[in-house]
Image: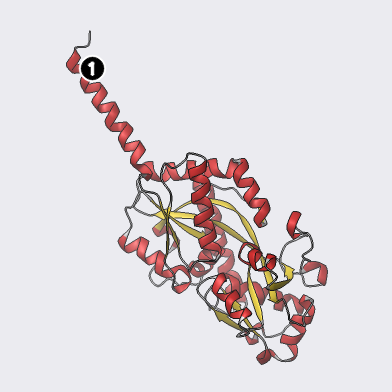
Amino acid sequence: MRTSATRGLIAAVALSLSAVTASAQENPECIAPANPGGGWDFTCRQVGKVLQDLGQIDKTMQVVNLAGGGGGVAFAEVVNKRNDSDDLIVAASSATATRLAQGSYPGNTMDQVRWVASIGADYGVIAVAADSEIETLPQFLDQIKNDPTSVSIAGGSAVGGWDHLKVLIAADAYGIDDVRSVKYIAFDGGGEAVTQLLAGSVQGFTGDLSEAKGFVESGDIKVLAVLAPERLDGDFADIPTAKEQGVDALGANWRGFYAPGGSSDEAYNAWVEKIAALYASDEWKEIMAVNGLAPLGLQGAEFEEFVADSVARIQAISKEIGIIK
């Protein structure tokens, strides 16, 4: 028979365990490794809102914009200063894998963090300002082919990053012999890159559909092609693919999160479960449809393996086009 003291001890232990579980993400935070307006910022803010709407987190997700180095500043911050934070996740994408593949985060590797989950794939686009005389992707690529110095293209990743690779892949598919002649200018996030396009500082934009969506709706930019295998549904059905214009170029940017390498198993598993619940929800399916995200829901070990494969594949592409040796 349990005494009142024993019952009290059991209750105290249960309460303590409950508190530990509840505190796994007591003050949820998401780092967007770019300025406001880009794809990483979109990832943090949309996911944070839906997680709270679904009751997966009790507090509003704090979003911190930490731009620089194509995500390298944020990666170093997490590895060196936030390594044991259980409350933190960081927005990641194919751009992150690209920088890791090319050794562009000095001293950092993908195994220094814990890969949580993906939330979909965002197809790449090549666009011009709405008032541009260019109407098709072949016209744009012809201009580059005939006079490479006359066309500068802006993107939200560093030179050699995923945004850069997308336009190089299109140029290579079109038969431009030396893709290194393509002029690419890097900015901290897709929002800033589009701003430069609208200001007339550059003639083209390479990014992802989620970044371009608002500017398409406002009538500021004209998407020449989406780098998808076939036309997308819904609001994006009118955007032609590169492939249907004779340019066999595909570019899907996965979106997801990593957590600090020293975070506890409990916190990591909790984040995996929360993101999995979000991905399965009707609310997130609607956001995916509205923003042109394609299905890609990987969690935990499966996602980590996917990222490792992505890093290896991008490394091979980068060597092929001479970005790395």
* In-image side of 98 versus 239 (left or right): left
Q: Residue furthest front?
A: 218
x and y, in percent, of residue 248 in the image: 76, 69
**Is 21 drawn above or below residue 63 in the view shown?**
above
Identify the residue at image location x=77%, y=65%. 239
In the depicted view, which residue is nearer to us: 92 or 211? 211
Residue 244 vertical placement versus 60 (above, below): below
Amino acid type, callout 1 = Arg
Q: Residue at x 60, y 44 (%)?
A: 283
Q: Quadrant of residue 80?
A: bottom left
- Quarter assignment of residue 214: bottom right
- What color scheme is it? secondary structure
- Residue under the point 43% across and 41% down: 270
- Residue 205: give x, y in percent of width and height: 64, 76
What is the count of numbered marks?
Answer: 1
Left or right relative to 243: residue 321: left
Q: Which residue is mark 1?
A: 7
Whole-percent x and y of residue 32? 46, 62
Whether residue 264 is situated above or below residue 69 in the rendered picture:
above
Which residue lies most toward the top here?
Answer: 1
The image quadrant where one finds the N terminus is top left
Query: Who is closer to the viewer here, 225 or 95?
Result: 225
Q: Is residue 233 visible?
A: no
Crowd tier of the residue under label 1, counting other residues whose Cα lies within 10 Å: few below 14, some 14–19, many 20 or above: few
As helix, strand or loop, the secondary structure at mark 1 comes to helix
Residue at the image point whose x is 21% and y is 20% from the top? 8
Is 92 above or below relative to 201? above
| Quarter-of-image position of residue 175 | bottom right
